[in-house]
Image (cartoon, coloured by chain):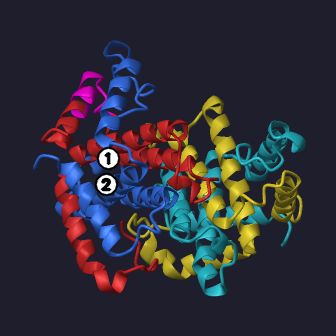
Chain colours: A blue, B red, C cyan, D yellow
Amino acid sequence: MSAEALDDLRERLRQFAAERDWQQFHAPKNLAIALSVEAAELLEHFQWLPEEASRRLDDSALAPIREELADVLLYLVRLADELGVDLLAAAHDKLASNARRYPVESARGSSRKSTEP
Amino acid sequence: MSAEALDDLRERLRQFAAERDWQQFHAPKNLAIALSVEAAELLEHFQWLPEEASRRLDDSALAPIREELADVLLYLVRLADELGVDLLAAAHDKLASNARRYPVESARGSSRKSTEP
Amino acid sequence: MSAEALDDLRERLRQFAAERDWQQFHAPKNLAIALSVEAAELLEHFQWLPEEASRRLDDSALAPIREELADVLLYLVRLADELGVDLLAAAHDKLASNARRYPVESARGSSRKSTEP
Amino acid sequence: MSAEALDDLRERLRQFAAERDWQQFHAPKNLAIALSVEAAELLEHFQWLPEEASRRLDDSALAPIREELADVLLYLVRLADELGVDLLAAAHDKLASNARRYPVESARGSSRKSTEP
């Protein structure tokens, strides 16, 4: 992976939208809807699958899921860009906050605590 | 942004889960649910907001949205890791596919085409 | 609409699942996923549509939306049945609770209050 | 359950919105977002729960889930009303269509077929 990978993706998506004159549709409200719709399309692949089966998908099951993961990232990067949010900085801040909220000792093995990744 | 930023985030999340013995909860099916729930929490901030107002949020409106964007990224990176998917490679493949699907000339300014970011 | 309309729908869905031996897949967790996926498929029809345009859809736009509304109701009734919840009683309780939470005078015209239907 | 139960709920919700001057916020696009957000709040209760545990929830676990089921129904009825769709007629049409799409013999016990309730 090259340096500035997410920055590069952000620039490519910004240019992709500009070339097609799609900024008019890319209000943050609409992008947040699109992100949520893509996350549901990803989830759809798991809806009738037993939990354990979801841990051992074969390549043919994984291929469409990989595309949905990509769609979620593309809309997430596009939305963060329109909002002027630095995604990676936000993620690192949130991870630090989660580390304070779920100390290793008290959170160990507790599903009640695992409301954060 | 440093090189290998997403790789670093992936490693930190993997360690975060391992230290808390949370891998048992992190079946891809459950992570896909969590991702979808976070995307909806992000969307909730926009539900009654006029489209144009979503383009000019002030800092106090943006702060909780920034946290939700982070949550979506954290679960997305965690899920891709559990599935063995390289997120950035998948995103670049999808972007190339979108470029073929929506040629600049025919897609320009058409909301019917803008089903992709 | 005949009397006991939702009860009748519940019975027909229960029989539909039983005849196909689908109860094994209809754990409430899975039905809650399916409901959320259907709600997103419904939302997808609105994602790039201006708010005002969503108030005046023509018949051809409405037809697929009508099907998605039906899917949401079918999964909602199926899920409530599996959980032993009386949907209409729950809805009336919630409406009474909302009436206390949003008194007419203070809630009038305020989008900040309109987080409930 | 009394006759015209859903009709009655629809009328009460319409009046609830009118009294508070909330019709201005209740564009179908916004109601579809709200419905999707409520479905995700419902799903959140199941995200770390094993599938089998979701079949035997105790009363304290069920109480907040019952409220979320109600919220989904309230927004669904409100949205269908704004769109002029008869929810029960749409549900019966969809159920008839599903019966043709998933004949009892070929669909029996197959999770691949169970993409409909």
Per the rendered image, the range of residues in magenta is B13-24
Residue A80 visible in this rendered orientation of the protein: yes
Q: Disc 2 residue type? A: Leu
Depth check, front residue: C24 or B56? B56
Residue D117 visible in this rendered orientation of the protein: no
**Relative to C31, is A18 on the left or the right?**
left
Residue shown at the point (74%, 49%) measured from the top left: C86
Residue shown at the point (80%, 37%) measured from the top left: C101
Residue beneath label 2, please?
A73
* Looking at the image, residue A52 lies above or below residue B99: above
| Percent of width and height locating residue A115 | 43, 32
| CB under 8 Å between discs 2 and 1 | yes
| Residue C65 in which image quadrant | bottom right
| Percent of width and height locating residue C20 | 50, 68
**Relative to B59, is D91 on the left or the right?**
right
Report helix, strand or loop for mark 2.
helix
**Relative to C80, is B105 on the left or the right?**
left
| Structural distance between the alpha carbons of marks 2 and 1 | 8 Å
The numbered mark 2 sits on a residue in which chain?
Answer: A
Residue shown at the point (61%, 49%) measured from the top left: D38
Residue beneath label 1, please?
B76
> Residue pushed farthest left?
A2
* Whether marks 2 and 1 lie on the same chain: no
